[in-house]
Amino acid sequence: MIEEKSAFDNFELNLPPAVVGFLKETSSWTYFLSILGFIGIGLMVLFGAFFSVVMGLMPGGNPYESMGMNMSYFGLIYVVMAFVYFFPVLYLFNFSRKMKSALATNNTDDLTAAFSNLKSHYKYLGIFIIAIISLYILIFVGALFTGLM
């Protein structure tokens, strides 16, 4: 039995030249921004590790010692922030890489993967912003109740 292929199986990118130009420029800028993001993540991890070690070794330099907090925990916060920041930068990098490939080879699979990564980038940022706004609301309500009592 011979399986017939659909006309959409061999569908080529049929985009106007202006759109192709916009997508090429966008992929170049997202590539640049993702590289800067990876550099920033690396610096955050290095600074967090440095901060943890240096502040942990400083004698008498911990103003939060009476509360039972070690200054090296503040360096850990930078490492956690770098971890949270890693995924949207990775999605942006994958978008630019796949978009460049799709435009160079007229490949719809790469175009689909590129836009899937862009969707994931914005979905991650949207969920993150909702979480941060919710945290701000909880802090505000907590401060309001603490101030009333």
Image: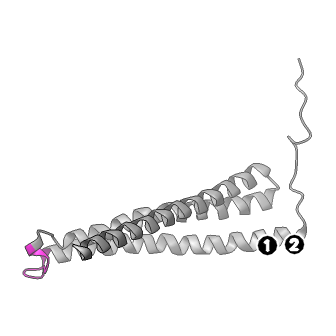
Q: Nearer the viewer, residue 85 or 40?
A: 85
Q: Is 81 above or below relative to 147?
A: above
Indicate the amino acid at tag 2. Ala
- Quadrant occupied by the N terminus: top right
Quickly name the residue at label 1: 22
Residue 73 location (% of width, % of height): 22, 68
64 vs 14, left or right, is: left
The crowding category of the residue bearing disc 1, from other C-alpha atoms within 10 Å (few below 14, some 14 to 19, many at least 20), is few
Residue holding disc 2 = 18
Q: Are marks 2 and 1 in contact (CB under 8 Å)?
A: yes
Q: Position of residue 47 (x, y in %)?
A: 32, 75
Please tell me the numbered disc located at residue 134: none
Tag 1 secondary structure: helix
| Rendered residue at 53%/75% (across/down) | 36
Indicate the position of residue 116 as horizontal and vertical percent values: 66, 54
- Residue found 86% across the figure and 55% down from its top: 13
Judge whether residue 85 is colored magenta. no
Quarter of the view holding residue 96? bottom right
The answer to whether 113 appears left or right of 83 in the picture is right
In the picture as drawn, the residue positioned furthest to the top comes out as 1
The magenta region covers: 57-66
Left or right, 74 with respect to 121, comes to: left
Split into 4 quadrants, where in the image is the C terminus? Answer: bottom left
User: Residue shown at 60%/64% (left/top)?
Assistant: 92
- The front one of 104 and 63 is 63
| SS assignment at label 2 | helix
Please name the colour scheme applied to the rendered image.
one colour
